[in-house]
Amino acid sequence: MKKSSFSLPELFYIFAFLLYLVGSSITHILNGVEISLWLMAFAMVTTISTTILPWLGIQWLTLEKKGCRAGWWLALLLQVASWGTYAFAMFLRLNRNLPRFHTLITLTTLLWAAWLLIFIYSRYACQPQHSDDKLGDETAHPIVLDEKREE
């Protein structure tokens, strides 16, 4: 069995999600108090930086390509959607439309949880069609008959 370890960008994603959960919980409890907005903003900056900086050439944040690429693309789509709902929620908070603000913060939390789960699943559980893993392949260890023994 392979030992699976998380890479640094994946740990950043998990840290940012947990930080966002704390911020969104405080937002719902205390009706959008400023500290919760700062926590959520820091979490968003962390996840956006972890996603965009590798595209700009920061190599130490680059993820190795493994798992299903379709799941990765779906996770990226959900991630960008969560950024959009978060930005619109902050706009509503600025305009003091608190009921819609709370609704969009909840939607952002659900989108973020979905993309993180799909992202991790597509990297670790989902195997592409042409995998390097030969554990289930019967031809990986062919049975070699010793022909000299029969003589």
Image: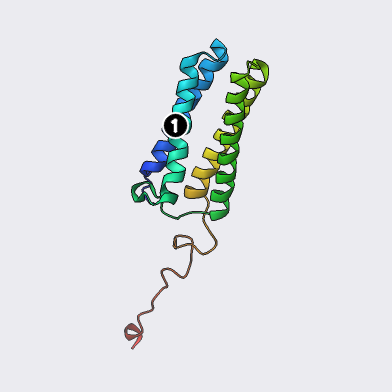
Which residue is rendered at x = 53% and y = 58% of the image? Answer: 128
- The image shows residue 130 at horizontal and vertical percentages of 51, 64
**Circle 1 — which element?**
helix
Q: Which one is nearer the viewer's eye here, 121 or 45? A: 45
Q: Which one is nearer the viewer's eye here, 15 or 42? A: 42
Indicate the amino acid at tag 1. Answer: Ala
Query: Does 111 sit above or below residue 104?
Result: below
Residue sticking out furthest to the front? 95
Q: How many marks?
A: 1
Residue sticking out furthest to the bottom? 151
Q: Quadrant of the C terminus?
A: bottom left
Q: Which one is nearer the viewer's eye here, 22 or 80? A: 80
The colour scheme applied to this rendered structure is rainbow
**Mark 1 surroundings: few (<14), some (14-19) or many (≥20) residues within 10 A:** many
- The image shows residue 129 at horizontal and vertical percentages of 55, 62
Q: Which one is nearer the viewer's eye here, 124 or 99? A: 99
Q: In the rendered image, which quarter is residue 110 located in?
A: top right
Which residue is rendered at x = 44% and y = 50% of the image? Answer: 55
Q: Which residue is mark 1?
A: 16
Query: Does 4 sit above or below residue 116?
Result: below
- The image shows residue 23 at horizontal and vertical percentages of 49, 21
- The image shows residue 81 at horizontal and vertical percentages of 60, 38
Which residue is rendered at x = 60% and y = 25% of the image? Answer: 91
